[in-house]
Image (spheres, rainbow, N blue to C red):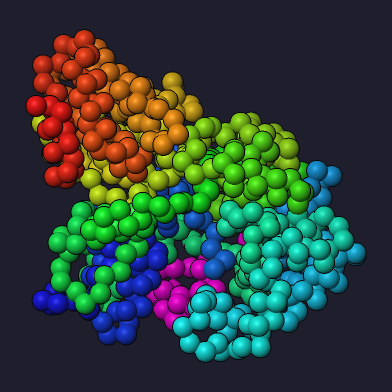
Amino acid sequence: MPSMLDAVVVGAGPNGLTAAAELARRGFSVAVFEALDTVGGGARTEELTLPGFRHDPCSAVHPLGVGSPAFKDMPLDRYGLEWLHAELPMAHPFDDGTAAVLSRSVSETAASFGPRDAGAYRRLVAPYLGTWDTLVRDFMSLPLTALPRDPVTLARFGVDGLPPSTWLMRRFRDDRARALFAGLVAHVIAPLGGLATGAIGLVFALAAHTGGWPLPRGGSQAISDALAAYVKDLGGTIHTSYEVKRLDDLPPARAYVFDTSPTALARIAGFGRFYDRYRYGASVYKIDYALDGPVPWTAAEPRRAGTVQIGPGSREIGAALHQVSVGTPPRTPFLITAQPSLVDPSRAPGGKHVFWAYGHVPHAWEGDLTEAIERQIERFAPGFRDLILARATAGPPQLAARNANYVGGDITEQHADAIVNAANSSLLGGGGVDGAIHRKGGPDILAACRALRASHYGRGLPTGQAVATTAGRLDARWVIHTVGPVHSPDEDRSALLASCHRAALRVADELGARTVAFPAISTGVYRWPVDDAARIAVRAVREAETSVEEVRFVLFDERAYEAFAAHVR
């Protein structure tokens, strides 16, 4: 490694890896640093439910990946990236047993809307057909950093796309076209009346007509793996299991690129409270399914589609998006679902299928949307529940824990009877302490957690409770998993945080453990102020009636150590 790098990239998700590749292929020296032990970020593939079922925890279908100007300039196919296309990019079923479709063919798409709207759709997209390469480069460069390549087309696109999508949908007379277009806008979790939401729907539609909505063979991890291999071949270096706490942890460089959240950037770069007022948008509640067969859609079109939108009507979709935007979980969620094994049999054992669905929920929402999601799916695919072999659920806290862009301390090196894991309710691993324990402890911990999910905690371990498994390869006899609460400025959840510590000690007593190591529960992605968390944790442990002889707090940085030490004294 040179004494002064041209660029350091923090975070090896697809965006960070793409930035590294763009720099490296231009001759710059680049190093990438990733906290987890593998690259991937939001483009990963894992066995979340049962052995042999390969799921994408985050993104699965990539219309803007296959059409990416950056990807088109990279030989990623040489590194194993192969795009697979379902017969239809997307289908949108209705209660009457029919469906509209988004096809590679404009004519097929228009015909599915019915005779009253077929012409309106053709006229909407016609000016942009054949212009994707220049249009997407200009659109993705906004605000413009250089003169647009095709200013006339970009200006026309602005006229159509800058107004709210509700304006654009007035072109359609019937709800079939309006509903499908509303679903396209909903992919970015934005209310339909937002500025430039028309452009979002148009981009997704044009992407289907140009390059399709494909999935990578083997899962989204293939994208990250191809990018990483390309970066290395260009002379870049990638460092995994490298936890960045501050800029001093990184080598000298002329530029630092962060593929992280704004708050993680502030913490690492030492910006203090610069991003304290940053507000995250709405989130999702996602379920990954292992199925005994294909989804039994009533309409024929969804059986051929890689993606299926479940609304069904534009008003229903608009209502769900509005409820989420004002902080209320939707009464009837709009769903986006994907069927990877429809085109990639390698994703599941013979005759079986993987399937995922998500609905929109407010940021940091802690509820359970499973029943509402499955009720919606059954509405258009009766008998769906009968095919479920296993499911892995993840709400906003669990999704954040899987990809937190946050660095914690290493509790995995502790020698103790029991190590406490700051788990998420799925018990299937995540980021921070949870991910570190699963990685270091090995597959025996995950197998034990899956057995607990199957036997006792089908919907996950509730917040504030605790349960034990083997410690696998850790230098301990047991891991005690407990789910901490997400901090809320509007609700006092300190009793739940205290309950985590008391419940963990009760389980330790049942096991006969004498030494227990705790992390700083809820202080990572769950955003609990570390000083307050230390106060609650120390008090809960001191007041607990327990036979445990030694409780050890293992802290991830100097600030946390000082906070806990102040309360232990």
- Identify the residue at horizontal 26%, vertical 70% (top origin): 256
In the depicted view, which residue is nearer to us: 412 or 405? 405
Left/right placement of residue 336 relative to residue 94 reads left
Left/right placement of residue 379 relative to residue 529 reads right
Relative to 138, residue 381 above or below: above
Count the labels in the image: 0
Image coordinates for residue 470, horizontal then vertical, percent: 25, 27
Is 537 magenta? The answer is: no
- Identify the residue at horizontal 30%, vertical 18% (top origin): 503
Is 73 magenta? The answer is: yes
Q: Quadrant of the C terminus?
A: top left
Region of the chain picked out in magenta, as a range: 65-86
Left/right placement of residue 527 relative to residue 2 reads right
Would residue 428 be visible to someone looking at this image?
yes
Q: Quadrant of the N terminus?
A: bottom left
- Rendered image quadrant of residue 183: bottom right
Image coordinates for residue 51, horizontal then vertical, percent: 42, 40
- Identify the residue at horizontal 14%, vertical 39% (top origin): 561
Image coordinates for residue 54, horizontal then vertical, percent: 45, 48
Relative to 51, residue 568 above or below: above
In the depicted view, which residue is nearer to us: 415 or 270? 270
In the depicted view, which residue is nearer to us: 128 or 148? 148
Relative to 399, residue 60 above or below: below
Q: Give the residue at the far right of this rendering.
A: 116
Would residue 451 be visible to someone looking at this image?
no
- Identify the residue at horizontal 29%, vertical 38% (top origin): 529
Left/right placement of residue 313 relative to residue 37 reads right
In the depicted view, which residue is nearer to us: 78 or 23? 23
Relative to 395, residue 307 above or below: below
- Rendered image quadrant of residue 5: bottom left
